[in-house]
Image (cartoon, rainbow, N blue to C red):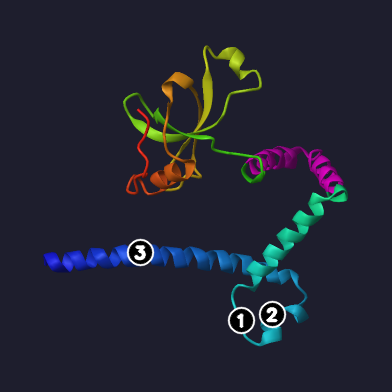
């Protein structure tokens, strides 16, 4: 029985990551293949080739992103983007959603941007309980006028999905900077502590 149990666990360790990876890739490809619906019926790859080959939507989506990026990078494109932002900024409900999403995307995808600056060790959700967090900046907009001392803007992710979490402002003295990269810290969070970072944490 012990040998069967070992074989079962070994098989799961091999198959589970593979199955999840294939499932995620299949979902991404299937979703992006929906972009083919914007093409005229006569241009549909399925009709031209006579057989469905997944992945053409990925190529089309990539081409669209590259074309939009190329247009937005020149002078006229920047003017059009500014005009578009100003137009959406005048619509009451859309304005709040669009501006928030744009600020986050500008931070994440900007060439000079760095959403997570430093991996931290903080006490959360109560003193004595420690978790991994990320410094996103420093409080601004007059917030520091109401805080006594030096504070950091900190994002505390949840596991295994780090896209959900909490934004808090903590005293800098209560945050321990870790000698690990942001990627290593994210891996540590996503793996629920199973995949330990290769570099030691600073004391």
At x 63% / y 23%, what residue is drawn? 140
At x 45% / y 64%, what residue is drawn? 21
Instruction: Note whether 123 is above or below 64 in the view shown.
Output: above
Is residue 7 toward the left or the right of residue 137 in the image? left
Which mark is on residue 45?
2
Task: Pick whichever, 17 or 165, lies toward us.
Answer: 17
Please say whether residue 23 is one of the residues in the magenta stretch: no
Where is residue 122, by image quadrant?
top left
Q: Position of residue 163 (x, y in %)?
A: 51, 45
Task: Pick whichever, 201 or 187, lies toward us.
Answer: 201
Label 1 and label 2: CA atoms lie apart by: 7 Å
Task: Pick whichever, 70 or 144, lies toward us.
Answer: 70
Which numbered disc flags the more N-terminal residue, 1 or 2? 2
Which mark is on residue 122?
none
Instruction: Note whether 102 is above or below 66 in the view shown.
Output: above
**How many residues crowd around disc 2 within 10 Å: few (fewer than 14), some, or many (20 or more)?**
some
Q: What residue range appears in magenta?
A: 78-107
Q: Position of residue 198 (x, y in %)?
A: 36, 45
Label 3 and label 2: CA atoms lie apart by: 33 Å
Where is residue 3, by image quadrant?
bottom left
**How many residues crowd around disc 3 within 10 Å: few (fewer than 14), some, or many (20 or more)?**
few
Q: Position of residue 98 (x, y in %)?
A: 71, 42
Which numbered disc flags the more N-terminal residue, 3 or 2? 3
Is residue 154 toward the left or the right of residue 81 in the image? left
Say which residue label 3 marks: 16
């Amino acid at each position: 029985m012990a040998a069967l149990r070992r074989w079962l666990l070994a098989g799961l360790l091999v198959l589970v990551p593979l199955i999840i990876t294939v499932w995620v890739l299949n979902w991404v490809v299937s979703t992006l293949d929906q972009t083919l619906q914007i093409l005229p019926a006569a241009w549909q790859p399925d009709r031209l080739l006579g057989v469905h080959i997944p992945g053409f939507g990925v190529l089309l989506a990539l081409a669209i992103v590259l074309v939009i990026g190329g247009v937005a990078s020149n002078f006229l494109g920047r003017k059009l983007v500014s005009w578009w932002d100003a137009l959406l900024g005048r619509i009451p409900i859309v304005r709040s959603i669009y501006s928030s999403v744009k600020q986050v995307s500008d931070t994440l995808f900007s060439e000079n941007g760095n959403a997570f600056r430093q991996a931290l060790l903080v006490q959360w959700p109560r003193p004595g309980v420690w978790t991994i967090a990320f410094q996103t900046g420093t409080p601004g907009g007059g917030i520091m006028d109401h805080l006594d001392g030096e504070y950091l803007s900190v994002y505390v992710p949840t596991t295994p999905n780090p896209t959900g979490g909490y934004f808090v402002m903590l005293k800098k003295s209560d945050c321990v900077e870790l000698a690990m990269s942001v990627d290593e810290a994210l891996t540590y969070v996503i793996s629920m502590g199973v995949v330990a970072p290769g570099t030691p944490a600073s004391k």
